[in-house]
Amino acid sequence: MTILADWQIIELAKAGMIEPFVDGQVKEIERPDWGNGGSYRDKVISYGVSSFGYDLRCSDEFKIFTPSTGQLTVVDPKAFDPAALVDYVGDVCVIPPHSYVLTRSLEYFRMPRNVTSICLGKSTYARAAVLVNVTPLEAEWQGHLTIEISNLSPLPVKLYANEGICQLIFLQGEQPITSYADRKGKYQSQVGITLAKV
């Protein structure tokens, strides 16, 4: 297996692996300044291609876990109760203490047959007691990536939509006998935030 470098990621992205794709690291963006009619530069949690990976962004769609429904006694991945999640759309999402949210990547992925990807959290969030969990993007999987984000702290934590949330590392090897698409994986072509399936 080979870890793909920035130029290889760029080539695959331009061939359709990542859409939309940012071919550099974005650390600031220009925002409108409604008070004076101009604009200003604002720092963001970085996203885009890096030396050996791609920092993806989370969308502004969130599902916040809350036990406030009073019905949930056990979280069961085989029979997940969607009533335990509250839908929220916004530029900033607050994760309650010792809770989690689901979101999706802004990017849509189409993995080549000989490439798989693993995900790691970004250090900015890790230092704020935020754990990002994403399962591998297998060969020939495609869709929006559902991202699980846990707040390990006793305090609420802010998440910023349309900014970096985690980094993907791409591994290239020989083509497998059976890809994710071949075995008709249950999360193939997912759009939006997808809950657990069995």
Image (tube, rainbow, N blue to C red):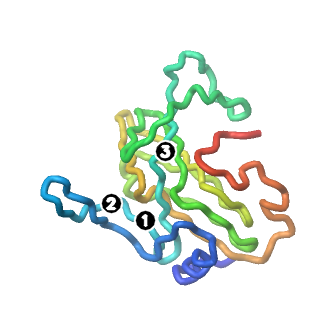
Q: Which residue is outermost to the front? A: 37
Task: Rate crowding at label 1 as few (under 14), some (14 to 19) or many (20 or more) other CA atoms within 10 Å.
Answer: many
- Report, in whole angstroms, how far the alpha carbon at label 2 lies from the one at label 3: 18 Å
Residue 48 image point, x, y percent = 45, 69
State the SS at label 3.
Answer: strand
Q: Which residue is mark 2?
A: 44
The disc label shown at residue 61, or none:
3
State how many labels appear: 3
Q: Nearer the viewer, residue 100 or 44?
A: 44
Q: First in sequence: mark 2 or mark 3?
A: 2
Q: First in sequence: mark 1 or mark 3?
A: 1
Residue 41 image point, x, y percent = 23, 65
Q: Amino acid at mark 2?
A: Val
Q: Is there CB contact under 8 Å for labels 1 and 2?
A: yes
Which quadrant is home to the N terminus? bottom right
On screen, residue 8 versus residue 44, left or right, reads right
On screen, residue 73 versus residue 120, left or right, reads right
Q: Which residue is mark 1?
A: 47
Residue 74 image point, x, y percent = 63, 24
